[in-house]
Amino acid sequence: MSLPSSAELSALALETARRCGVDVDAIAGDVTTRSPINGGQVASLAWQGIADVDIAVERAEAAFREWRRVPAPARGALVKRFGELLVEHQDDLATLVSVEAGKITSEARGEIQEMVDICEFAVGLSRQLYGRTMPSERPGHRLMETWHPLGVVGVISAFNFPAAVWSWNTAVALVCGDPVIWKPSELTPLTSLACHAVLAQAIAEAGAPAALSQVLLGGPEVGEALVGHPGVALLSATGSTRMGRTVGPRVAERFGRSLLELGGNNAAVVTGSADLDLAVRGIVFSAAGTAGQRCTTMRRVIAHTSIVDELTDRLASAYDRLPIGDPMAAGTLVGPLINGRAYDALDAAISLATGEGGTLVAGGGRALEDVAPDAYYARPSIVRIEKQTEVVTRETFAPLLYVLPYDDFASAIDLNNAVPQGLSSSVFTSDNAEAELFLSAEGSDCGIVNVNIGTSGAEIGGAFGGEKETGGGRESGSDAWRAYMRRATNTINYSGELPLAQGVDFTV
Ligand code: NAD
């Protein structure tokens, strides 16, 4: 198996970014970016500093004053055009996602498809930013609510969804009347510049303010400056729980609004009545897909004692057949980890779990080390373990699946919920009562609860996010748009009298 050279990847990435509208010469600087495909250098880019955050917020505030006056359906027209341009550049953007994040082509294209989907959703939304009318208790009065644009939205994103997460926020923010400043992951800068360039074209064609979309490349310090800036009305941050622990309180300190999308530790409960063919397929995609680097990646299987041995064997055999390699090559299903740190975390978790009584039944170790010593292709791993020990309750951001047994369904639900994170969960069962119980108030405590499907691969139509250490935020579909607007409650008196609420008498 051979992998593309750094020269090839660099030329491909820069040419692709140029096609998306990035002025490749203008962005050159001294910060090196690397591709996880071979660990080699892709580009040297200029980063912004803390002072640039002030400038960006000032520009965004000016854009906001103009954009909030544009009717929402007209704002939707801009997003419609953005979606069309994304379709034109789908392969380009997918290539950049593969080069910078290491996703296999099909998943990288899927990520861009998700961007197109959220644009379509947001266009429809632009005519549905409904407020309610409530019956007033007073005669000759009308009580209602209206939704207005909120202000500047700051978006901080993680490496593993380098394009889609920004678009979930941006497409919705734009129709809601808000400009966006994006601080992408430092590991995926070209993808973000290319996404921004495509949107900039739609903005220019619409004659809208250029500062509706801005990108600030930089490390956590640039993110921190955005987080602390009083001009940022909503800070939407996607990344590790460690990051959220810093960001959440800092935004709260200044009474800003935050939307946190943090780590997950997602489980599937597989009951004795489950269709095991379906379960194996669903688990393998959710656990080993994206090389285990989705926030919704399945990290635990909680299987009934009657089927746990058979299920473990079938999963181990499927894992042995997973094609690992160049994510842009046809047939590959598992690409590289983002870097050596991710591999070390995987290795350490396996050692801890086996030290705590677990047995490694699939995977372990690196692949392709000989061809690409600086890239980290991990063999997706399964550890069979009898108890949910400390390491099992942590998110290890790599393809490591723990299989745990259970006896009665109530204890399976308890195990599902007995972790600090609360993002995604699923149950595989043919028993309707079990499925309903898992979905009920006594069931899974996660933001996403599925039946007979894995934990990952959400559609944009639903609200996306999770509870507990996952941060509580919801973005994308359903009514997640409300986070991007401010609500005003209005009482209109057309009675000619002044009756006070609750019958209060204040006659002078
Ligand atoms: P990370 O936390 O290392 O970085 C995420 C972003 O936060 C980066 O842009 C980084 O520069 C920024 N950042 C880090 N510290 C900061 C600080 N103190 N102030 C401001 N910004 C800061 O995460 P990662 O390794 O890029 O991504 C993997 C993690 O993201 C996993 O935990 C995964 O579960 C999570 N994730 C969650 C979701 C979700 O929707 N819940 C989606 C994708 C990824």
Image: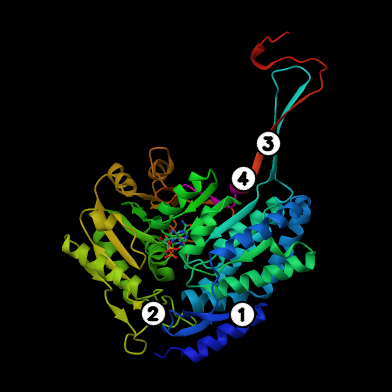
Is residue 479 on the magenta stretch? yes
For the residues labelled 1 and 2, the Cα–Cα distance comes to 27 Å
Query: Percent from the top left, x then y, of residue 457?
Result: 49, 61
For the residues labelled 4 and 1, the Cα–Cα distance comes to 33 Å
Vertically, is 450 above or below 403?
Answer: above
Comes first in the chain, label 3 or label 2: 2
Instruction: Look at the image and give the residue range highlighted in magenta.
Output: 472-482
Q: Which residue is mark 3?
A: 488
Q: Which residue is mark 1?
A: 17
Left or right, residue 232 beside residue 355: right
Image quarter for ligand 1 equals bottom left
Marks 1 & 3, CB-CB < 8 Å contact: no
Residue 145 found in image quarter: top right
Q: Identify the secondary structure beneath mark 2.
A: loop
Tell me which amino acid carries mark 4.
Arg
Comes first in the chain, label 4 or label 1: 1
Front of the two marks 1 and 2: 1
Q: Looking at mark 4, is its residue's CB closer than 8 Å to ligand 1?
A: no
Q: Dot 1 surroundings within 10 Å: few (below 14), some, or many (20 or more)? A: many
Q: Identify the secondary structure beneath mark 1.
A: helix
Q: Dot 4 surroundings within 10 Å: few (below 14), some, or many (20 or more)? A: many
Q: Dot 2 surroundings within 10 Å: few (below 14), some, or many (20 or more)? A: many
For the residues labelled 3 and 2, the Cα–Cα distance comes to 53 Å
Q: Which residue is mark 4?
A: 482
Front of the two marks 4 and 3: 3
Comes first in the chain, label 4 or label 3: 4
Tell me which amino acid carries mark 2.
Ile
Q: Looking at mark 2, is its residue's CB closer than 8 Å to ligand 1?
A: no
Marks 4 & 1, CB-CB < 8 Å contact: no
